[in-house]
Image (tube, helix red, strand yellow):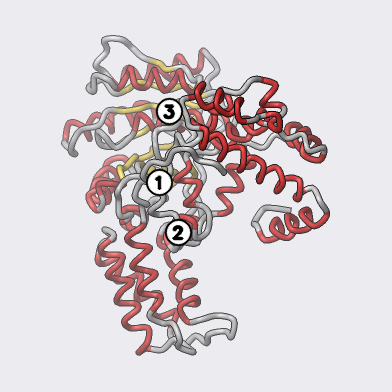
Amino acid sequence: MYFCSLAKILTNMFQSLQDKLDKALHNLKGHGHISEINVAETIKEVRRALVDADVSYKVAKDFTNDVKEKALGQDVLTTLQPGQLLTKIVHDEMAELMGGDAVELNISDNPTIILIAGLQGSGKTTFSGKLANYLKKKKGKNPLLVAGDVYRPAAIDQLKVLGEQVGVPVYTEDGSQHPVEIAKGALKFAKENNHNVIIIDTAGRLAVDSFMMKEIRQVHEAVNPTETLFVVDSMTGQDAVNTAKTFNEVLDYNGVVLTKLDGDTRGGAALTIRTVVDKPIKFISTGEKMEALDVFYPSRMADRILGMGDVVSLVERAQEQFDEEEAQRLQKKIAKNKFDFNDFLKQIDQIKRMGNMKDLLAMIPGAGKALRDVEIDDDAFKHVEAIIHSMTPYERENPNVIDASRKRRIAKGCGRSVQDVNQLLKQFGQMGKMMKFMQTSQGKNMMKMMGNKLPGMN
């Protein structure tokens, strides 16, 4: 894949924790089995890594004690190293620590009412828009967004903008300062207009206070929500856990949403919050794009923390953008060696719809760590698209006609250098050869073997 411009990749959420766990597990290299002696220092380093990542000491201690108990005395298979075996044990225990199995959103047959709670700045409004988009596109629902934050001046306008982006109406009551009445009015409006999901964005404060908690409780009692979700900013670390505990004592919410996982955060909230409040993490949110919302799978998150990637999620995102008719059309063109830049633009668009490049790379086993210092930008395709759009329709359909004079004109038209155009043409040619190879029996057999190794692939 060709990238004309690369900007510095954001720090991975679990980068520090991943590095320290790698170092800790490396200590067992060369041993034939796991014993009290050779595991002691490793367990100590794992515990220290968790505490440094903002996991509470008690949770970290209980976790490492469980790991040690399960690890001691286990024979190491000839095909495994002790470090690999302990990595599996750590992975399984970490997934269990974060909840074990994923917990789906509770969607009832009657209108589903979802109340969104959290502190100001936690990302409640953005998450509300993402959730509406998720329920509309992936669950086939007809959601209604409700602007219940009457205190933050920009909250209502922000929700309207997000609603317009995802094609979901927003219920507001201009001038009203009564969240309970707004919520009641929204329920009536939803029933009259056949909205089967109602998402209520509520007000937050900079810190927990009695007035805030009383108001959110009143809204909760007035609408009797199907689901109450607590949105927490992962960047606040252990404070996020304390806030989650306070809100749970008042609302007894159904689940937690972790936002801003793409920021400079050590990830302790994700590893601790499930244990402290005994409520499942239901969604994780990264970035500002409305598609950047994922159901929380503890096992997959453990994969990411330990640098194993998340192939299943990557495949699922690709499948969401998969168009069978388009794929058949493309396959025929590749077989006839007719793949052109118009087709290439469509492939770029599909990749962009899968999410931001940082998230996609983090799902590839080993790639997140290997490419940590490589600069990758969500806008990395912009210059590629600019070069292609600078071509004439004939040139896009017939790349082989692009000679030196055409390259100069194309480069001048998009503000890039001739070298950039040459690089794109070269890599486009290489990609064409690879696609043609995939149509051969040898290529198909290779893809079949790869598919059999991926969960959910046939």
Depth check, front residue: 400 or 301: 400
**Mark nearer the viewer, 2 or 3:** 2
Name the kind of residue labelled 3 in the image. Gly
Which residue, given by chain and number where applicable, does mark 3 sit on?
A: 129
- Name the residue beneath numbered marker 1: 375
Residue 442 location in percent, x, y?
80, 57
Q: Is 36 positioned to the left or the right of 33 in the image?
A: left
What crowding class fits label 3: few (fewer than 14 Cα within 10 Å), some (14-19), or many (20 or more)?
A: many
Q: Which mark is on residue 191?
A: none
Residue at x 61%, y 30% (from the top left corner): 404
Q: Report the front residue among 432 and 400.
A: 400
Q: Residue at x 78, y 35 (%)?
A: 333
Residue 343 at x, y percent in the picture = 68, 31
Q: Is residue 404 left or right of residue 130?
A: right
Considering every residue shown, the one lying at the far front of the view is 405
Question: Is residue 261 shown to the viewer in this render?
Answer: no
Residue 441 visible in the snapshot: yes
Q: Quadrant of residue 429?
A: top right
- The CA distance from mark 1 to mark 2 is 12 Å
Which amino acid type is marked by label 1? Glu
